[in-house]
Image: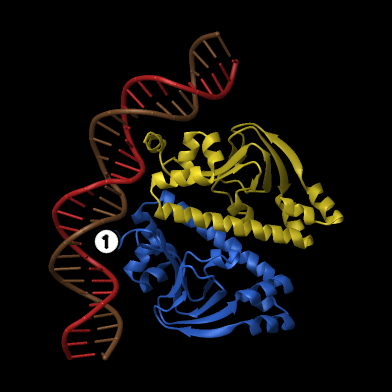
Chain colours: A yellow, B blue, C red, D brown
Amino acid sequence: MQMFSTFDGKDLDKVVDCFKARLIKKNEILVSEGEISKEFYFINSGCIRTYFITKQGHEKTRYLMIEPSIGTALTSFISQKPSFEFIDALEKTELLVINRKDFYRLVDEIPQWKNFYLKIMEMAYSFQNRKIESLVTLSAKERYNQLIKENPKVVQRLSNKIIASYLDIKQETLSRLKSK
Amino acid sequence: MQMFSTFDGKDLDKVVDCFKARLIKKNEILVSEGEISKEFYFINSGCIRTYFITKQGHEKTRYLMIEPSIGTALTSFISQKPSFEFIDALEKTELLVINRKDFYRLVDEIPQWKNFYLKIMEMAYSFQNRKIESLVTLSAKERYNQLIKENPKVVQRLSNKIIASYLDIKQETLSRLKSK
DNA sequence: ATGATTTTTTGACCCAGGTCAATGTTTTGC
DNA sequence: GCAAAACATTGACCTGGGTCAAAAAATCAT
């Protein structure tokens, strides 16, 4: 976020003009499955997440965004194909929103914004890679411990249901893990 | 790859100058764990992969590159931190190699190369995302069937050991899956 | 070609984590 | 403030896929 301070005055105005503030309620849905992801979000306060629903009807949480954080349903945002994931709010949340058209216009017009986009992609990639590594190398208990260690805010603030879905375990299992 | 045809003459020369051909033998290692990933590979013929070894000593294959394809140990390439993954050749392989310094010089000097880099990151991200989706929603059998359907060449050309490691199952399990 | 190594298959057994169901406990909406 | 809904815990039981071991088949190196 502080990288914005390196924009020069004119560019900064251009960027700021693209953002709109939005306040959303808990459980409000920003993107549904099948919709095209047309916005990118900066979370000022609160918490949103991306998740999808398996054909067995189970929720799987891909990514949790607690302030200060950024994100969207990225696969659909990039490809402009219908999203297989949802975005919803886990708390009352204040967002800054930029729409996709403006986002990519800035990519073309402002070299630093293109660099910012590249950084987002690099971080998103590394994050997914890390997630795969955890899934294939760690037990449920180890993944839970890793989350407590690396992201204690998430564990403190969110329900077990959400945390279990994020760790790809059942809530019953999480409950049992905690009690030993 | 065909996007290179859109480079104008001068830029194309600049790009071509950065590449060196290299022939590697089966089982040759291009990047080891702990090393920094300093090259990006274009596979002209043959097959290489990235994999890592768990603390239990098991190989996990992240990504298989059969010609024509591109890639590297991307997390380390981006961050210039030591790689947790290896790259090795699964067959005798012909590569075009560009080193990291040249790669990022081209990102700065040639806008189209920056766009190319962005496309790589977008594809890499989508690929990882898809992999997570498969891991958390499909059974071993379903993942195997998906691979046969979407990437039959891989299944035909590589050993069960590699395919099992790619699907995150044991070879014994893969063997049993195939026999029913 | 041929012995040595590596892969593949098969069998017997095990266990982490899922399922289903019942019972608390908290949160929410009015 | 209170009913209803959502969430958390606990128990009994089950199962997909792992483990270990040993034999059969394929591949490799000289």
Q: Residue furthest right?
A: A10
* Closer-to-camera residue (B10/B24): B24
Q: Above or below — where is A45 with respect to D16?
A: above
User: Which of the 4 image quadrants contains residue B13?
Assistant: bottom right
**Residue for point 71% across, 61% down:** A115
Residue A170 percent coordinates (x, y):
40, 39
Q: Above or below — where is A103 with respect to A158?
A: below
From the viewer's perspective, tell me whether residue B161 is left or right of residue A81. Answer: left
Residue B164 percent coordinates (x, y):
35, 63
**Residue for point 54% across, 48% down:** A84
* Closer-to-camera residue (A95/B31): B31
Q: Is residue A179 visible?
A: yes
Q: Residues within 10 Å of mark 1 (few under 14, many from 20)?
A: few
Residue D9 percent coordinates (x, y):
38, 28
Q: Above or below — where is A168 with respect to A158?
A: below
User: Which of the 4 image quadrants contains residue A90?
Assistant: top right
Q: Is residue A53 visible?
A: no
From the viewer's perspective, tell me whether residue A99 is left or right of residue C20. Answer: right
Count the marks: how many?
A: 1
Circle 1 chain: B
From the viewer's perspective, tell me whether residue A25 is left or right of residue A145. Answer: right
Residue B111 percent coordinates (x, y):
73, 70
* Closer-to-camera residue (A73/B148): A73
| Quadrant (top left/top right/bottom left/bottom right) for the C terminus of chain A | top left
Could you say whether the residue bearing mark 1 is in a helix, strand or loop? helix
Amino acid at circle 1: Glu
Query: What residue is pinned by disc 1?
Result: B172
From the viewer's perspective, tell me whether residue B51 is left or right of residue B72. Answer: left
**Residue for point 57% across, 68% down:** B77
